[in-house]
Amino acid sequence: MTETITRGAANQAGAHINKNAYAEAKDFLPLNGLDHVEFWVGNARQAAHYYRALWGFTPIAYAGLETGVRDRTSYVMRRNDITLVVTGALGPDGPIAEHVKAHGDGVHDIAFSVDDATSAWRETTCRGARSVREPAELDGGEDGTLRVSSVGTYGSVQHSFVDRRDYQGVFAPGFRKIRKPARAATGMSLLEIDHCVGNVELGDMNRFVDYYRDVFGFAQLIHYDDKVIHTEYSALMSKVMTNGNGRIKFPINEPATGKKKSQIQEFLDYYYEAGTQHIALRTEDIVKTVRTLRDNGIEFLGMPHAYYEQLPGRVGDVGVSIETLEELGIEADRDEEGYLLQIFTRPIQDRPTFFFEIIERHGSRGFGVGNFKALFEAIEIEQARRGNL
């Protein structure tokens, strides 16, 4: 029987943690981790500048007219183990331009690193995945062969399987290395992608939970229902899926019935379908990182003073003074395994859709359930300013 516990800050009904999730995940689809995340954007050059100048990502590769690619431009941006690709269309027609017109800038591909792209495609499609790209070998000449395949998930998001064992190029055939990249911003610690959050329509959360379980072999790590994630006005429900080695974690959210519109419904209203709401980037120094990002112009959600008045009694010592946490707007939470510090940006484009989270973990594998109510209230303030609550 699956053991569920309610622990630490999540000691209220509706927050259920599956201690056996990693053991329950199936091994028919070995995933080494996230290879990259690709965004489809309105202007790839400007997006690349944004991630370089504000977030400290180094542009390492480029594809476009100069490399023989006629319909799109892409920049590969890297910082430590985080690889982001920003891709824009070179004309008004085609899937990229249509995607940006409908959704604005958004996540198109959350790609997995695998040892065998053909086996990964076969194992997932035979279990019901929608094939987006059949297994292909991309000839990189002296750089070797890159093997890829892709399947669909919620909305227009896809998962590519990338096998780099026989490829030594900078990113993929058709890309050239950027030999003298412009200097990236410094002074921050961003190490890896901690988790990627998907928003789906009301009634679809369990469908995609089943999809990741049956197709990818994931197991449910945590379930938060609307008894936990709610305010006076709105609510959401969330389930977190993970693979067996714990390197990939996908919370899946759906709106819940409330007096007013939830943040999940606002996302769906402006993205016009299910999509990736935010990506959490893990840091080992959230204070320094947030200070630097704020100085660079990144805007974060703020938390009320009352939140920080209650924080010492709820989480105890987290290695950072309450005064510093309040100054920067950083949230803290604790469970039986440890604690975490986290903060959320405002949406990074005009539409109130995609944003980033910065998270620093000290033992805790949770997602800050003790912060949900205060965070939701802070988001509702932003929604009210936009006239969307």
Image (cartoon, rainbow, N blue to C red):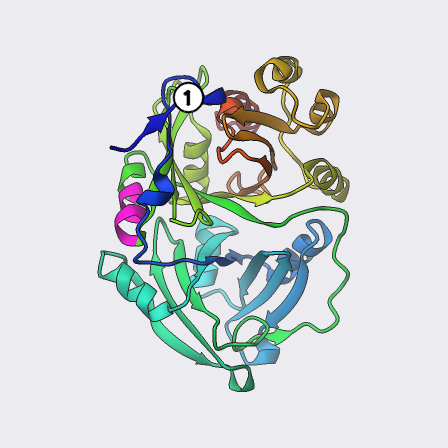
In this picture, residue 119 sits left or right of residue 188: left
The residue positioned 74% from the left and 21% from the top of the image is: 323
Dominant SS in magenta? helix
The residue positioned 46% from the left and 40% from the top of the image is: 270
Q: x%, y% of residue 224?
A: 38, 28
For this rendering, which residue is in front, 9 or 180?
Answer: 9
The N terminus sits in image quarter? top left
Q: x%, y% of residue 23?
A: 34, 44
Above or below, 61 relative to 356: below
Q: Which residue is mark 1?
A: 228
Q: How many numbered discs sit on the rendered protein? A: 1
Above or below, 267 relative to 72: above
The residue positioned 61% from the left and 79% from the top of the image is: 66
> Within the image, what quadrant is residue 315 found in?
top right
Q: x%, y% of residue 241?
A: 37, 42
Under circle 1, the secondary element is: loop
Q: x%, y% of residue 57?
A: 67, 56
The residue positioned 48% from the left and 71% from the top of the image is: 164
Amino acid carrying label 1: it is Val
> Within the image, what quadrant is residue 131 found in?
bottom left
Above or below, 242 relative to 260: below
For this rendering, which residue is in front, 95 or 378?
Answer: 378
Work out whether residue 132 can be spotted.
no
Question: Magenta residues?
Answer: 208-215
Query: Which residue is at the far bottom?
Result: 142
Q: Is 72 included in the stretch rendered in magenta?
A: no
- Crowdedness near tag 1: few (<14), some (14–19) or many (≥20) residues, C-alpha within 10 Å: many
> Within the image, what quadrant is residue 359 found in?
top right
Work out whether residue 184 can be spotted.
yes
